[in-house]
Image (tube, helix red, strand yellow):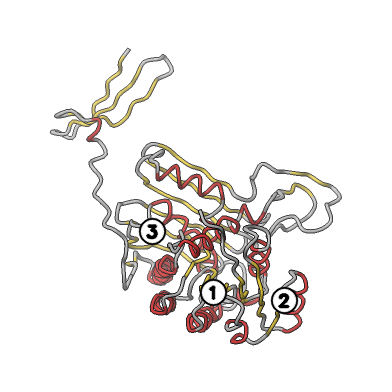
Amino acid sequence: MSQPKNHKITMLGTGLIGMFYTMTLHNQRGADRVHVVYSRREERANAFAAEWNIPHATTDLGEAINHPETDVVVIGLPNNLHLEAVQRAAEAGKAILCTKPLGRTAEEAKKMLDIVENAGVFGGYLEDLVYPPKTLKALESVQNGAIGKILWVRSRETHPGPHSDWFWDLEQAGGGAIVDMGCHCIEIVRNFVGKDNRPVEVMCWADTLVHPIDAEDHGIGLIRFESGAMGQFEVGWAFRGGMDLRDEVSGSEGTIWLNHWLRTGFEMFTAVGQGGYVAEKAESDTGWLFPVGDEVAELGYRDMFVDMFNAMDEGRQPLETFYDGYVVNAIIDACYASAKSKQWEPVKLEEWRGKAVAADADATDADADSRYALLKNERMPDGRMKRIFRDLETGEIIERVED
């Protein structure tokens, strides 16, 4: 494998996500450094540059993107600013990595997808929560058939609410908890059911239960896929006790449970506090605490950027592309339509690039003779084996107990 190239990066944004991105980039491959930082506030741009030893800081978006020494633009801005930033970076001929969600709507995301592809520049979608090491290992197990046919995937993200003011503004963000955190959950679900598995329709509930805002602060959604698999997400901005990140995958031959944040194997009680930051969205530094050993790894940032820059250097697509971001936005649009209509709504995709999902053989075929299909084997407390069959001719359910 060839040595990684040295990339100089323009970082757009100095909020929490810009900080996590910069922290990750400056501490991994060793070849990639933030060279220019942009913020809408001069004092913040200068402070961020000083903290992370970045040579250039500016409040001029065009100057940041068009800086002659950078070849990659990382977008960590509020959602309503993504489209302009993508347009300018594509015109500058630079590789573009954009934070989640790609757009506020599928229409906006599709415009960004078209801009990147028409310009012929690299486009990576920074969906970090499909990249935690545990998730990558689980995905490998699923792809190797360890849990059989995927039937149902549940993804949950809840916490006490976003860290910046713009998240709470409907116009800037494009929505509330669903567009903010549902985008994570939806893409986690898509990875587990398979990206060639077309999302067909959505049923969603959304409401504003706690905060006096125009957008929803809670949401629950069901996504039906072409294979029959079901995806489920749960998001909320009023969960107390930190950040709850959990995934569950149910297959015909097994189950996967993932707990990323509150139950990581590091639990600590302190009556006096440890003095300072514990973990993202932690609400207290006393009592029972759940510190995270390496946040950028556990949140997927490290493996995400390794994949993005390796893909860039190797001339291939990363795991997460602008097209993935567009599909996520299309599902979110359907969620909002369903929350309003209170019925199943179709996922409207202007362009579907997935391969056709092959029809699965009847689930009973492998265990069926000419007439009886095996439904269940179970060893009973007395040691005998109980077998339950379905008579394929009559439909009758038959139980047999064997010594």
- What element does badge 3 sit on? strand
What's the distance in space between the residues labelled 2 and 3, CA to CA?
Answer: 46 Å
Which quarter of the figure has residue 243?
Answer: bottom right
User: Tag 1: residue type?
Assistant: Ala
Q: Say whether residue 40 is left or right of residue 135.
A: right
Image coordinates for residue 124, horizontal then vertical, percent: 49, 67
Q: Which residue is mark 3?
A: 223
* Disc 1 to disc 2: CB gap under 8 Å: no
The image's mark for residue 55 is 2
Earlier-in-chain disc, 1 versus 2? 2
Q: Residue at x 66, y 55 (%)?
A: 295
In this view, the residue farthest toward the right is 272
Number of the front mark, 1 or 3 = 3
User: Tag 3: residue type?
Assistant: Ile
The image's mark for residue 215 is 1
Q: Say whether residue 387 is left or right of residue 95.
A: left
Number of the front mark, 2 or 3 = 2
Q: Residues within 10 Å of mark 1 (few under 14, many from 20)?
A: many
Which quarter of the figure has residue 143?
Answer: top left
The image's mark for residue 121 is none
Image coordinates for residue 44, horizontal then vertical, percent: 74, 79
Image coordinates for residue 119, horizontal then vertical, percent: 42, 79
What's the distance in space between the residues labelled 1 and 2, CA to CA?
Answer: 39 Å
Earlier-in-chain disc, 2 versus 3? 2
Q: Say whether residue 305 is left or right of residue 327.
A: right
What's the distance in space between the residues labelled 1 and 3, CA to CA?
Answer: 21 Å
Number of the front mark, 1 or 2 = 2
Q: Residue at x 40, y 39 (%)?
A: 147
Image coordinates for residue 351, horizontal then vertical, percent: 31, 71
